[in-house]
Amino acid sequence: MSSKPTFDELMAGCSTAYHLEMRDLYAVDYEAGPFADWRAGYRHDPANRAAWWRPWLDLVSDAVGRGVVIRRARIVSEPVSEYTRFLYDGTFTNVAAGEQVRWLARRRASDIALPGNDFWLFDGEWVHWNHFTGDGASLGEEITNDPVSAKLCTEAFDSVWARAIPHAEYKI
């Protein structure tokens, strides 16, 4: 790895990868089509794995196959937004690929110290910040191994994870 690894390098070399999502809307380019399709009534067929989100799910499946623990926690407002319903409906694909996914109602996160941005945390050391506009468009990433940031993200994720409800039990 270089002195500042890429996301792919971090995923390839880690043993744990934790992702905290805290927005009720994401307007990232690669989801525009799938979100529009979902709004028009399309739903993933559990039996048609080839049609699911690629290449992400392949990356997750390969990592989990190597023993990587991948956890995703989502803090959501309730009642949930239309976009969160879209995420929820497709989350079974993440779980099938090997991610562990939990949901936490925003009202239950009020006393948790949370960072200002969504993040990926790799092995409790590297933080991959995701920056977004107010409308949810991506403003890019920032990768750091700053110990203060890593500690904040570790504590925040652990607190959210402990309170959050596993995907199979969370109902919207």
Image (cartoon, rainbow, N blue to C red):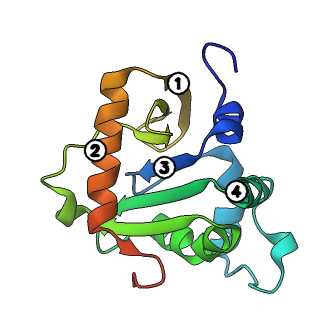
Residue 81 seen in this snapshot? no
Name which residue type carries label 3: Tyr
Provide the residue designation for mark 4. Answer: 60
The answer to whether mark 2 and mark 3 are in CB contact below 8 A is no
Instruction: Give above or below for 117 relative to 79.
Output: above
Name which residue type carries label 4: Val
CA gap between label 3 and label 1 equals: 14 Å
CA gap between label 2 and label 1 equals: 18 Å
Quick one: 81 or 124, which is closer to the camera?
Answer: 124
**Which element is circle 2 on?**
helix
- Disc 4 residue crowd, few under 14, some 14–19, many 20+, Cα 10 Å: many
Provide the residue designation for mark 3. Answer: 18
Q: Position of residue 124 (x, y in %)?
A: 43, 38
Which residue occupies 71% across, 39% down? 12
Provide the residue designation for mark 1. Answer: 143
CA gap between label 3 and label 4 equals: 12 Å
Quick one: 13 or 35, which is closer to the camera?
Answer: 13
- Disc 3 residue crowd, few under 14, some 14–19, many 20+, Cα 10 Å: many
Q: Position of residue 126 (x, y in %)?
A: 49, 30
Which residue occupies 67% across, 74% down? 96
CA gap between label 2 and label 3 equals: 12 Å
Which residue occupies 84% across, 71% down? 51
* Residue found at the very far left of the displayed protein: 111
**Along the horizontal axis of the image, is 149 left or right of 167?**
left
Provide the residue designation for mark 2. Answer: 155
**Which element is circle 3 on?**
strand
The answer to whether mark 2 and mark 4 are in CB contact below 8 A is no
The answer to whether mark 4 and mark 1 are in CB contact below 8 A is no
Sequence-wise first label, 2 or 1: 1
**Which element is circle 4 on?**
helix
